[in-house]
Amino acid sequence: MMQQPRSVRSAAGAAGASSTAPVMRPVVSSVSAHRSPRAPVVAAASSVSTAPSTGISSGRRSTISTNDRSAAITQRRARRAGPSPLAAAAAAAGSAAADGEIFDAVIVGAGISGLVTGMALDRNHKGVRFLVTEARDRVGGNITSVQDEKYVWEEGPNSFQPNDSMLRAAVDAGVAPQLVFGDPKSPRFVLWGGRLRPTPSGPDILTFDLMSLIGKIRAGLGAIGVLNGSPPAGGEEESVERFIRRNLGAEVFERLIEPFCSGVYAGDPSKLSMKAAFERIWVLEQKGGSLVGGSIKLFRERQADPPPPRDADLPPKPAGQTVGSFAKGLRTLTDAMGAKMGPERLRLNWRLTKVERDPATGVYSLYYDEAAAPPASGGNGNGSGNGNGSGNGAQAAAPPSAVVKQHVVRARSVVSTAPAWALADLVRPSAPAAAGALASFDYPPVGAVTVAYPLSSVRDDRRVAAAAGGALGSLPGFGQLHPRTQGVVTLGTIYSSSLFPGRCPEGEVLLLNYIGGATNRGVATAGDDALVAQVDRDLRSMLIKPDAPPPRKVGVRVWPRAIPQFNVGHGDLLRRAREGLAAEAGWDERSFHLGGNYVSGVALGKCVEYGYRFADQVAEGLKEGRAGGAAAAAGGAREVAAAATR
């Protein structure tokens, strides 16, 4: 989705080489135990955001529209390349696995959250023996970069904010040389009053025309605490709409924050929680009584206790406010992570069906169905994922694969990065209250529609002005957001070919459009052609010439369950889920870890940042578990010795 306006981000901001570690033997045992055909299935795909990229999670099994052209390209690649080499190697490793050993951790899900957690365990906690399992035949979850003979496009997250955690991940995966960044001087636009208006970016904070003078004065007075009212009494949780209207006024909400909520969450700001969704801004008022007061206090705290210096091996942080990707798309990162993990620590096409814990030893048993690898994911790592991305492991545009083997994996801890709704199905037999809380997280549908036009189809006033009477230039900018009040169905549009190089041929523009979300759930059942037609109608009202030729349909992907909504009560639901797992199933937080973007936040950078911390949390839980086990064993020995002397 779209990047937030720079003014919003500034407020929030106040707030290699392949692995040389020894290959460890996987621990798996084939089983023939009977299981009900209705056993719950957890997808190993972790959701991510396009935060603006929005975090996009896998959806249900229902049939949805597919891009025939992209699917055909993928099928041709698959026929040429055969099954994924990584999938084949992982299957061979799984069939050769030994029985009897116990992993320290099993990470359920090889999306970005699971991959980063595994990579961080390997980098920072060398003694931890872990396994990553994935229901699909590829890693990356909903990061879906696609390329054909002409275009490179994204059908899930589209970019990331280049914080140090993202750069660390690129270095650790060995793909830092392939990083690309947008021009920080490129404008971002919001549709208002029939015109695309630039958002403020610094010096133009007083002159930009997206807001009136009265609206700017109201926002300034609220920001310094003169006109921001009082927070709700009794710790009542505020929605984004209520918080922003109270602190900054109606214009900031309607013209900046509401479209930004659409761009990040595809959400409804009257339901989104300010504390849960935008904690870094929410906490400023808590710290200093106002947004400016909190920013000043936070600045002083950082001066008194500065962060540690950056790692010397990180690439320079890009100047200004920008976004990043890789030359061939985001999947470059996740594919490299999967390759670095290697087949000894990664299992593809493994669907988790049941989890049990031995109360005597505390060891978990995870039951898996291994499916035959389908040939639908092209062998070059950039095959199209068009169609339904199913969170329960169903392959896009392909029937469910037959189970070829069943396995049991034993582990001291379980690290779940599956979507909340998928995990709910898995834990319901053991922890129904926890399952109810997990199932309550809302994941509305979102469609990603990529189209191409001739550059000449872009309205003249949207292109770079001609120099000395020369021809008009390119389409400048990151993209545009569309408030729900402006009569446009599309949530926002990314100028893909302006943002990163090599996305389309010379003389064309490539546009990624997001549609759907919490206020428009009908996209889940809409066909490709209907979605492309709606996007085209919207673009012709402000960006594309009304008489331009029809667009070229490059890629269409609908995610029936897309971005987890951090609505009011989000934190309470997460607490109830954790408490229920511990009380009902005996799966305590020290050994059963909840992760993924419904925990970390939907932005891709947040998932990565949290993944590194998550690995520390897992390692600490293992350390505490071992200490507790040693103490219990010592106590038992003392009791035996005492009994022997009586």
Image (spheres, grey):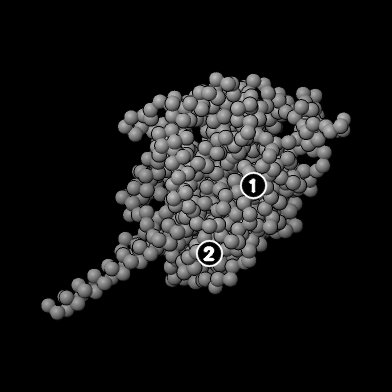
Answer with mark 2 or mark 1, whichever residue precedes in sequence.
2
Residue 167 coordinates in the image, percent (x, y): 60, 54
Residue under label 2, please give it: 123
Left or right, residue 619 beside residue 553? left
The structure residue drawn at horizontal position 73% and vertical position 36%, both measured from the top left corner, is: 476
* Res 383 visible: no
In the image, is residue 60 above or below residue 190?
below
Closest to the observer, 480 or 441? 480
Residue 528 coordinates in the image, percent (x, y): 68, 34
Q: Secondary structure at mark 1?
A: loop
Closest to the observer, 103 or 475? 475
Instruction: Bin the neighbour count of mark 2 within 10 Å (Cα to Cα): few under 14, some 14-19, many 20 and up.
Output: some
Marks 2 and 1 sit apart, C-alpha to C-alpha, by: 28 Å
Q: What residue occupies the far right of the structure in this picture?
A: 469
Closest to the observer, 628 or 532? 628
Left or right, residue 99 beside residue 361? right
The structure residue drawn at horizontal position 54% and vertical position 22%, both measured from the top left corner, is: 215
Instruction: Bin the neighbour count of mark 1 within 10 Å (Cα to Cα): few under 14, some 14-19, many 20 and up.
Output: few
Residue 76 coordinates in the image, percent (x, y): 75, 52
Number of disc labels: 2
